[in-house]
Image (spheres, rainbow, N blue to C red):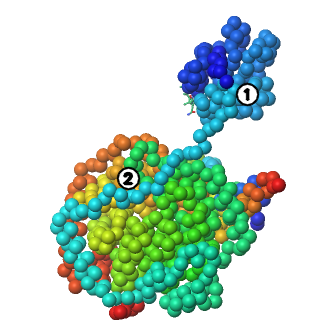
Amino acid sequence: MVAQGVLSRVMDALDLETFLVCSSEEEGKELAIRLMKSLGFQDVDLVFIRFGGPGARIRVRAYIYRPGQDYAWVRQIDDGEKRG
Amino acid sequence: MAFERRKILLVPLDPVHDIGLKMIRRGLEQAGHQTMLLPPDLPPEEIVSIMGKEHPDHVMISRTLGYGVGEVLGRFVDLADAAGLRDKTALVVGGMAVRPELAAELGFDAGFGPGTSVEEVVAFVEGRPYQPDLAGAKKQKKDITAGYAYEYRHAGIGNLLEKIVTNILTWSEGKISPGILRSRLRDESWDVESFRQGKVSREFSEAYAQLCDPVPQAFHRKGEVHPKTRRQTDQEIARLEDYLTKTKSRMTVSKVQHVEGQPKVFIQYGTGCPFMDIAHIKVCEAWGADGVVHFDPSWGARTEGFIGGFLTHQEDGSVVTPENLSWIKAALEASTLWQVRAHRGLNTAETVVLAGKLGADLTKINIAYGSLAAGTDPARLTVDGIEAIRMAVKYKLPFDVVTNEELAGVPAHKAFAGMLIVTALGRRLGARPILQPLFSYSPEVMIGGQMINNYIDFNAAKIEALRSIIDAPLWPGAPIGFLTQTEDRVQSSMTTSLHAALAASLRVDAISIASSDEAYSGGPIIAASRVDTLQAVAEGFRFFGEGRITPTVHAQQWADEMVDKIEAVLKEVAQSPTFVEALYAGLLGSKEEGAYPGRGGRGTVTEK
Ligand code: B12
């Protein structure tokens, strides 16, 4: 998947942080990954989760570019500027 | 143009908030304007009536609360319109709740959001264009070894170290290795100017290939790159050039330090892709990093010889090639210190030469660590390490002596004994070594309990102990806070910041810091996480300034114990037939303590 539009300007990865209402850490993990997949991200991983009473504090990550890939932000900067 | 004194009415159209407006008032008065500040919470009708009486040139409204903003401000503009006050008076609005678009929509003459500087407002009132100071912080490269005389403060330990150094130098006389031969070939026959012009010397390539393992051999004879890597394409290179030119043109560097003398801050890069490394380095420079450290892949230390090419790969660590290093060097700001690590493997000596020729400022060498915890044969790394130190002298590269064997479980005093031996060797050969104790929650303290109460005492003890032995620069690392970080970015940034504050309090010369991804191993470190810890460290430095953290009584007690134990270890090493045998005997870290004499390059040391 080549990143499109604004997403292609993300230098490497997009982190999403929030608090999910859930009943266990397992459920929180599953919800966090599902949340990212439902937003259309493929290369996703849970960076951090801590569950307690009402739910889980999470940080979940989608890599837009891993090192060694073709980073579209270089081209995007070109496209964004008028060339004579 | 003559100065025109303006009459300005300042109005907090907010229940309470008026600090921003007071700041602006002070700026306007200092610039010579006449101001009048109304109290908060006046009804718009009253404000308009005051305007009618005072006839100010400008009315400056401030709004902080984000509730009902459009309504309140809109009503005020309507009333001012109805009273016919708009012709002679400019209506300006600003504050935390204001966005310029909203101000324009409501019919204000101008709008200023949060973070507006007082100078900008004064310039606006005076009808001048505002020119922010884009130059940023002025930074200069600092020699972190300046001012150290390397005098022994502990005579007993000094004598032992000198004796050990003499033994090592005598033992190593006449010994040679493929690594030494390559470093001399690179030193004598590899011309950096020709390399920059793209000229390949066949003679050098063939002579070099003969001293290498098969993978570098295939590169130098047939141009094949390492199977795990790929060359950057011409198109990628053209884009990188373009990206660099544009980024550099708008680069400003900032400072992490709040007061003079706080430690220089290094970050470590090595995403596997030199292009991504450059992108990260530029981010770190903009956020205040003073120096950057090149991390190569682990196989780099186990292979005899370097390959070449502008190479990327998808594993941790960026390959050391002349091209990769040159690109990184070209990307650095003039003020950024650049360290290329040589310390642990079969290319230790040659790395120093390459780094020196390509303009590095610092390198890293430690014979004890490299042979006890990084897989290289003790005899091989001893002869190569001496060569590396000589090359560091020749290329004027100070080097740190890292003590990562502590992470394997070697107690601090043994790791320090090894570090001090290499430091003394450097001192004898005319080098500028830098002590690198870890600030870490090491296996030793996990078992021994020295950090049950706090992370301060044992780290402070390390600095105290080393300072009482030798007058040498100190650069805790690498990174500080090893094994105290978790995947939680707040916790991770916080522990880095506090360890940095401790380092500053102990008045050390430099620190290496991690990103907030330090304890995350599911993927590469990302740029945003580098920003996290740089910001956190800056905040720690801001908070403490010249203030100090006070260790408990344990610190001094542990420091004294450490010094005694270091002396005892050095006595044993001095009595050992050779330094290499001392390494094998576990005097500087035993198998039980997690140190295993390495095998890389075993049997490759020969007599000349
Ligand atoms: C100080 C403060 C107070 C003080 C105010 C003292 C005073 N005399 O001003 C006190 C303690 C009284 C206070 C009270 C309240 N506060 Co208060 N307060 C703050 C605080 C900490 C700082 C605001 C500030 O002064 N910043 C510093 C100045 C220099 O910045 P500034 O105002 O943005 O000004 C700059 C620019 O905006 C611009 N500017 C400002 N005005 C203008 C005007 C013009 C014409 C121009 C050109 C430029 C310009 O230039 C300035 C220089 O850069 C903020 C939180 C924060 N950390 O920001 C909360 C904050 C503003 N407060 C808040 C709230 C909610 C309140 C209360 C309503 C809480 C409550 N329910 O009790 C009460 C008010 C109660 C009441 N009576 O109505 C919220 C607002 C949230 C929102 N969405 O609106 C904030 C953001 C805190 C929060 N996150 O909850 N507060």
Quadrant (top left, top right, bottom left, bottom right) of the N terminus of chain A: bottom right
Query: Is B208 in front, or is B449?
Result: B208
Establish whether ligand 1 lies closer than 8 Å to the Cβ of label 2. no
Beta carbon of the mark 1 residue lies under 8 A of ligand 1: yes
* Residue B231: image tag: none
Labels 2 & 1 near each other (Cβ < 8 A): no
SS of the residue under disc 2: helix
Query: Is the residue B351 above or below the residue B3 in the image?
Result: below
Q: Among all residues in the image, which is located at the extreme front?
A: B1
Please name the amino acid that badge 2 sits on.
Ala
Ligand 1 picture quarter: top right
- Residue B595, position as x, y percentages in the image: 35, 77
Which residue type does callout 1 highlight?
Answer: Ala
Q: Position of residue B472 (x, y in %)?
A: 30, 61
Locate residue B521 relative to residue B178 in the image: left or right. Answer: right
* Residue at (48% x, 53% y) in the render: B140
Write the residue at 60% across / 43% down. B134
Chain of the residue where label 2 is placed in the rendered structure: B
Q: Chain of mark 1?
A: B
Q: Give the x, y percent position of residue A76.
A: 76, 58
On the image, numbered disc 2 is attached to which residue? B503
Residue at x 58% of width, y 77% of height: B194
Residue B331 left/right relative to A82: left
Query: Which numbered disc flags the more N-terminal residue, 2 or 1?
Result: 1
Under circle 1, the secondary element is strand
Question: In the drawing, what numbered circle is on residue B110?
Answer: 1
